[in-house]
Image (cartoon, coloured by chain):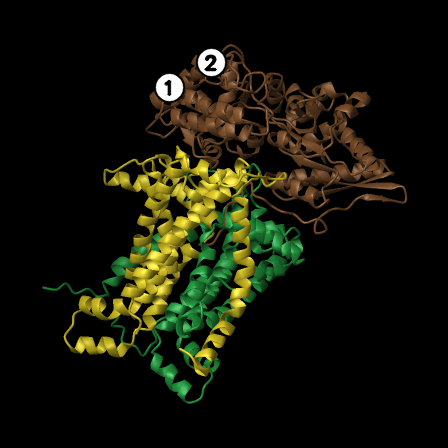
Amino acid sequence: MKRVVSLVLPLLVLLLAAASCGGGGSSNGVVNITVWHGYEDVEGKAINDAAKRFNATHPKIHVTVQNYGNADYALQKVLTAIRGGAEPDIAYLYGSWAANIARSPAAVDLAPLIQSDPSINWNDFWPAERQAVQVGPKIIGVPALVDNLALVYNKKLFDQAGISYPSDNWTWDDFRAAAKKLTNTSTKQFGWAYVNDASEDTVWRFDALLWQAGGDILNSDNTKAEFNSPAGVKAATLLQQMATVDHSVYLDSGNGNYANLFNSGKIAMLFTGPWDLSSFTDVNYGVQILPGDLNHQTISGPDQWVMFDKGSARKQAAWTFLKWFTSPQQSLQWSLATGDLPIRQSTTQLPQYATYTKKYPGAATFVLNEANAAKARPVIANYNEVSQAMGQAIQAVLLGKAQPQQALDQAAQKVDSVLASGQ
Amino acid sequence: MRLRLPFSPRHLVLLPLSAVMLLPLAWMLLTSIQTLDESRHFPPQLIPSGIHWQNYPDAWNAAPFGRYFANSLIVTLASVVGNLVFCSLAGYAFARLHFFGRDVLFVVLLATLMVPFQVTMIPTFLIIKDLGLVNTLGALIAPNLVTPFGIFLLRQFFKTIPIELEEAARMDGCSRLGVLLRIVVPLSTPALATLAIVTFLWTWNDFLWPLIVITSPSASTVQLGLASFQGAHQTNWTLLMAGNVMALAPMLIVFIVAQRYFVQSLASTGLKG
Amino acid sequence: MIGRAARSEHVSGWLFVLPAVALIGLFGIVPIIWGAILSLQENDLLTPPTWVGLDNYRTLIHDPVFRASIHRTIVYTLLFVPLSVGGALAIAVLLNARIRFSRFYRTAVFIPVATSTVATGIIFNWLLEPTYGVVNYLLSFVGLGPYGFFQDPDQAMYSIVAMTVWGWLGFDVIVYMAALQGVPDELVEAAKLDGAGRWAIFRNVVFPLLSPTTLFLIVWSTINALQVFDEIYVTTRGGPLQATTVLVYYLFNQAFELFHGGYAAAIAYVLFLITLVFSILQLWVGNRRVYYS
C-alpha cells in the first residue's frame, strides 16, 4: 500500500544543510540574513515587498526571505537544519512550539535585547502575544501574528428567525437560546458549529468557555490539571446540552466543512477567527465578541518570529529587521495588504487604521476582542499531551458518550500523570 | 424458463460497480471546473453553472509543473525499469533455483515490508544523506529500484510456468539467464505488465518520501507540487482538483496502453469466467 | 546435492538475487536495524536520546491503548483481506470475457487505485457525512439511516473498511486478471467437453491454477492491512473516541505529535512481529495447499 499521506502532517522533515538556504554572512560590510516563512499568495507577495522596502532603506543589511513550504512542518525543518548548522537567522514558527524551540541553544533568548533596547516598545504588543513567547524566564520570539476567536454570525438567518443580532453582553443562555431557535431539522440548518475531531481545534474553543466561567487549564506552576473544576464542568455541560439535548450544534469532523456550510447558509453562528472571513463570500456576516459567563474572555493563537544565533553581527541585523518589520507603521501596512490583525495595540491610533477596518469588515471587532484575550494556554513542552487528553474528553461529551464531570476527571488524571513524570 | 437478456448479465454487476468506482473522478472533474467561490459550498453543487477551464492553466502555472512532471516521469520510469530487471532476476531465482539460504532469504526480504515506513523513513534519509543524494532525483530513485513486493509477485507467476519448457531449453544448452530471458519472460508479459503498472502507480503517487528528501523546486515531483495548493488555513480546491486530474492522466494512459498485456487475447474463447 | 552442477546452481542463484539483496539490504534492512535500536531509547527525535533498554516494551505491555489498537488492527485486517481479495477474484472473473465496454470497466475499476489518498478521503468524507452526505440521502429513500459512519464510534471502523476495500479492489483485480491469462485454454476446453458446468470449471480448474496468486494477494493484503494509516489519517484521525486508532496510527501519534520516538519504534517492532507471524503462517499453509502447475 503506497504511503501517500495527507498534508497537514507534522513529520520529521530532515533538511540537509547546503541544499536549502544557509545563505548569510557578510560581504563588503553588508550583513546578509535569511528569513524563513510559510506565506503564500497575498501574504507571500507582502513579505517580498516588505523585504524589498527594508533592503532599500537599510544599505548595511540585506534580507533574503524564503518560503519553507507548509508552516506545519516548520518545527522539524528548523530543528534539523540546526543539526546541520544551516538554520536561518529568523523563522516563522507556530506559537504552540514555543516551549519546544526554547530547548534548543540555537534559539536566541530575546529578554536581554528587549531590556536593553526600549525602542522595541515591548509592552505595545498585545498581552496574549507576549505571554505566548514567554518560556520561563526566556523570551524566545517576536510576535508575528495574532488572532482570536469571536462570534461570526449570518445576519440573514437571524433576520429570518426574527432574533436580534448578538450584543456584546450576550450570556451563554442568550447564545444557547438563539442557537436553538436558529436550528431547523427539516432544512438541515444548525444554530452553531463546533470542530469535534479531538484535536487542539476542539480544545481551544472549550478553553475560552472555561476561562469565561472563571476556570483554568492547569494550576499556576503547571503541575496539576484544573480544567475539571466546577467551571470546567459548567463549560462542558453547555456543550453537552447544546449538542445532545438541543441538537443545535453541527459537529465538524475536522475537515473544514463548517466554513463551507456557513458560506452556504446552513449554519448561523461560528466561534472562529479572522482567517476564515475571506471564505465567506456568499454571506452577509457580522462579528461580535463571544457570548460570556462571568466575563467575555476569548483565546488567542499567536505565532512568532524566532531568532537564531549566527554570530553577533547577524543577530544585530536580524534584531534591526524584526524591530522594523513589527513597527506600528510596517505592521499596519502588512495588515492592509493581508487582512491580518495588527500586532500592536498602538496601531489602532494610526490615521490609516480606518482604511484597514473599512477594507476588512469585521476586523475591527476582532481587534477590540484582542483585549479580551487575558489568559493564555500553558507554554510547556508536553502541551500536546494535555491537549490530547482534553480533546478526547470534550469529544466524548459532545457525542453524548460521557458525562462532563466524569470525562474531565478522567482527562485530568491522565494529564496529572504526564505532568508528574515530566515527560 | 431461462431469462434471455439481450446483453450479457455481467453488465448488471459491472455497470453499477463502475459507477461507484468512477465517483472520485467525476467529483474531481466537477470541482476542477468550478470557480473558487462556487467550490466553497457544502453540500457541493453538483451541477456547474459554467465550465471554468481556466483552472487548468492556472494550476499548471502556479508552480513549475513542467519541471515537476519531467522529474516524476524520470523517477517513475527508472523505478519501473529497475524493478522489472531486478525483480525478474530475483523472482526467478526464488522460483526455480535451489541455493543456500533461499527460503530464509525470501522471508527476510519480505520482512522488510513489515516495518511501517513512518519508522524507516528517518534512517533511510540518513543513508541517502551519507550517499550525498539529498535533494536529487537519485534520492527518489535509489530506494525504489527494487521492492520485495515485485520479487514475491514474479516468483508466484514464474512458478506457474510449465517447468518442462525450461528443462528442455536447459538441455539444449541454454544458460539459466538465457532461460529466463528467452522462455520465462516472454511467457510472463501479464505479470510484468502488472508490476510495471503498480510500480508506476506507487512512484508517481509517492508523497511522503519526496517531501522529506527534496527541498528545492528543481527536484520536486508532481505530488509535491499539488501540496502547495493546500495552505495552512485554506485549500484552493479548484486548483488542487485540476492539478489532481492532470496528475492522474499519465497513469491512466499507462494503464490503458498496458491493458492489452494482461487482457484476454482475441483468439481465446473466454471460458474461464 | 553436491557436485559441480549443484554448486553452479548455488552460485547462479546468489548472482541472480545479488542486485536485489544489495539494494534491499541497504534501504530496507539497515533502516530496520536502526529502528530496532531506536526502540531501546527514549528519543524525541529532536534532542539527544537516552538509553532505556527494554523499558519501552515493558510499558507497552501495560498500555491499554496499545492493546486496544492491536485488537482494532486485527479486526480491520480480518475484514479487509477476505473482502478485497474475494471481491477482486469475482470481479476479475466477470471482466475476463469478451463483452462490450470491457475496456471501460477495467479502467473504471482501476481509477480508485490511481486516485491519491487525499482525494479519496475528501470524497468519502462528503459521501458519508451524516447530515448532508449522499449515502444517507439515498438510504433515506428506502427508510434506512441516517447513519453516523465516520462520526459514530461503532461504525467508523466499518466505514474505513468500506473505503479501503473500494480503494484497493482494482489493484487485486489487475493482478488476478494477469494471472487468468496464465490459465491454459485447453484445460478449460477439456473440462467443458467433459460436461462440466461453469461453477465446476471455476472450482476445479481455474481456482487451483490461480492459487499462487491468491496466496500472494492474501499475504500482501495482510501485510498492508496491518499497517493501514493513510486513509484513517485523511478521514477519522484515529477517532471518534479512538475507534479507528490502529497500530500505525498510534505509532504516528506517539512519534510525531507527542515526541515519543523510542516508544513509537517499540510499537513498530511489535507490529513487525505480529506481521511476521501472520505471514509465515500464511506462507506455510499456502505452500502446502497452493497448486503450482
Q: Which amino acid type is shown beneath numbered disc 1? A: Gln
Q: Position of residue C65 (x, y in %)?
A: 41, 35
Which is nearer the eye, A19 or B160?
A: B160
- Residue at the farthest bottom position: B172
- Colour in which chain A is drawn: brown
Q: Position of residue C213 (x, y in %)?
A: 34, 65
Instruction: Name the residue: 40% across, 44% down.
Output: C124
Q: Decide which of tag 1 and tag 2 comes sooner along the chain.
A: 2
Q: Position of residue A57 (x, y in %)?
A: 85, 35
Residue B89's mark?
Answer: none
SS of the residue under disc 2: helix
Residue A244 in sight from this viewpoint: yes
Which is nearer the eye, B193 or C147?
A: B193
- Residue at the farthest left position: B1
The green-coloured chain is labelled B
Q: Which amino acid type is shown beneath numbered disc 2? A: Ala
Q: Chain of mark 1?
A: A
Q: Position of residue A404 (x, y in %)?
A: 39, 19
Disc 1 target residue: A241
Instruction: Name the residue: 79% across, 44% down.
Output: A24
Disc 2 target residue: A231
Against A135, is B196 above or below?
A: below
Q: Disc 1 vs disc 2: which is toward the camera? A: 2
Q: Which part of the image, by quadrant, shows the C terminus of chain C? A: bottom left
- Colour in which chain C is drawn: yellow
| In this rendering, position of residue A246 left or right of residue A421 | left
Occupied quadrant, residue C6:
bottom left
| In this rendering, position of residue A357 left or right of residue A32 | left
Instruction: Name the residue: 35% across, 23% down.
Output: A244
Which is nearer the eye, B220 or B208?
A: B208
